[in-house]
Amino acid sequence: MLDRTIAPPIHDFEPFVLPQPSSVQLPNGIPFKLFINPHLDLIHFIIRVKAGVFFEKQKNVAAFCYSILSECHPSLSANEFDGKLDYFGATLNLSVGFEYVTISFIVPKTNCKNAFSFLSEVLISPSFKEESVKKQKEIKIKNWEYSSLKTDIRANRLMYNAFFGNEKPYGKIIEISDIQSITPELLTEFYHDTFSAPNIKVYATGNIDDELEKHIATCISHFPAGNRSMTTPQIIFPKLPPKIVDYWENAMQTSLVLCRPCLSYTDQEYFDFEILSTFLGGYFGSRLMQNLREKNGYTYSVNSASSYFADQSVFFIETEVNNDNVDYAIEACFTEMKILREQLADEEELNNVKQFILGSLMRSIDGTIQYMKKYIGWEDYAMTEQSFYDGIAAVQKADVQLIESLANKYLKEEDFTTIVVGKYPSK
C-alpha cells in the first residue's frame, strides 16, 4: 500500500522546447495565432482587445460596454442570443482589466463554423439597446450596493484610488451616479473607438484543420479595420502617506492592504522579486502565513502579490483581521520584512519556495489551453517564450543572499502605505 506520509521524490527539470504557434496576419492587420491540438475537439478562442479601463473617458464605460455584449446582437434579444449559444453548446465569457478586454469563446468543433460566425455578428455590429442598458444598470447598482458593504473591496479600491487619483477614470472610486450616467450612445462611441484591428489580437487552440482555420480567418477579416491604436497612458505614482484609514463603526472585521510602487513586468529583477514575494506571502507556507495565521491566529489568510501595468506595478499585502488585532497584524507584517532584511533565510525554506514556483511555472504551460493563456501574457508586454526559460533559470540560481539583498531593496517599511478599512480609529 502507498505510504502517503512520505512525500514523492522531487525531480530536476529536463531541457525542453516550447512549441511555436502558427501565425496568420489577416488583411485588416489582425494577428491570428493558432495552438494546434489534434486531441482537443473543444475549440478555445481568446480575443484580446486593448480597450480596458485605462482608455475610458468616463468611469465604468469600459466594463459596462464589453460586459453587455451578450445582450447586443443586432437582431436578437438577449434571451434569443443565449438560446443560440446553448444550441451551439458554446460558452462566452467577457472580462475587462486595466489595459485589456478578454473575450473567451469555447465551442465544440462540430459547431465551430456556425458559432464563430454568429459571434462575429455581434462583435462587428453590436446594438446597445436602451432596454438592455437599463437592465444592466439595475444589476450593476445592486452589485455596487453589495460590494460597498465589504471592507476588502473598499480597501482594494482605496489602493488604486491612492495611486491613480480621482482625476483619472481608472483611479476614481465608482459611485452610483457613474452607473446611472451610462447611455447607449456612450457605449457605442467607446466600442467603435476601441474595437478595431490595431487593438485586436485573436488566439485559438484545439483540433483546428485547414478548412476551419480558413473560415475563422475570414470571419476575423471582417472585424473593423480602424486606424487608431490605443496608447497606454504614462503612469506616474504620487508620494503616498504612511497610512490611509477608512473607519467603519459596524465592521465585523478590518481589512488591511500594505502597498508600494514596484518594478515593471519587463524589469530585469522581475523573476527575482517574484521569488521574494512568494517567500514573504505568496504561498501557504510563506513567512506571513506562518506568523499571522499559524503562530498568532490573526487571520485565516494573507497574501502578497503584484498588480502589473504597462511600465510599473503595485506590490501589495492583503488580509482581514479581527478588529482588536489590527495593530498587531500590521506590526507582524513589518516584522517579517525586517527579518528578511536582516537575517539570511534557511536553505531548506528557500528550496521549498523554489520548488513551489517551478511547479507553478510548469502548471502555467500544462496543455495548449494554459500555454496559450501564458503566451498571451507574454505578448501583452512585447515578450516571448524566452521569458519562461529566463524564469526557470532565475529560480534555479536564486540563493539566500539574493533574498536578503532584494528584501533590503524592496521591503523597507518607509516605502509602504498601509490602508485600513474597518473599525479602527484614525491615528
Image (spheres, rainbow, N blue to C red):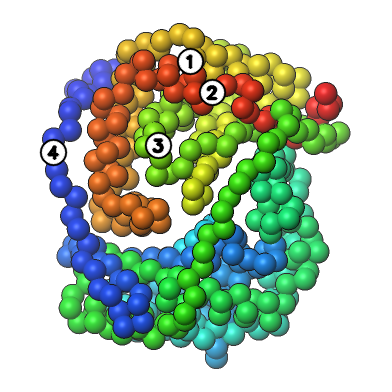
Q: Which residue has dot 3 on it?
A: 270
Q: Earlier in the sequence, mark 3 or mark 2?
A: 3
Tell me if residue 251 can be seen.
no
**Contact check, label 1 and label 2, Cβ < 8 Å:** yes
Q: Residue 340 shows which numbered tag?
A: 1
CA–CA distance in space, label 4 to label 1? 33 Å
Residue at 67% in and 67% down: 57
Q: Secondary structure at mark 3?
A: helix
Place residue 106 in its image quadrant.
bottom left
Q: Amino acid at mark 1?
A: Leu
Circle 3/circle 2 CB separation < 8 Å = no
**Marker disc for residue 240:** none
Amino acid tagged 2:
Leu
Label 4 is placed on what type of residue?
A: Pro
Disc nearest the viewer among 1 and 3: 3
What amino acid is labelled 3 in the image?
Tyr
Q: How many numbered circles are shown?
A: 4
Residue behind mark 4:
15
Q: Earlier in the sequence, mark 1 or mark 2?
A: 1
Tags 4 and 1 touching, CB below 8 Å: no
| Mark 2 vs mark 4, CA separation in Å | 34 Å
Q: Secondary structure at mark 1?
A: helix
The residue drawn where x is 43% and y is 65% is 48
Q: CA distance from mark 4 to mark 3?
A: 22 Å
Contact, mark 2 vs mark 4 (Cβ under 8 Å): no
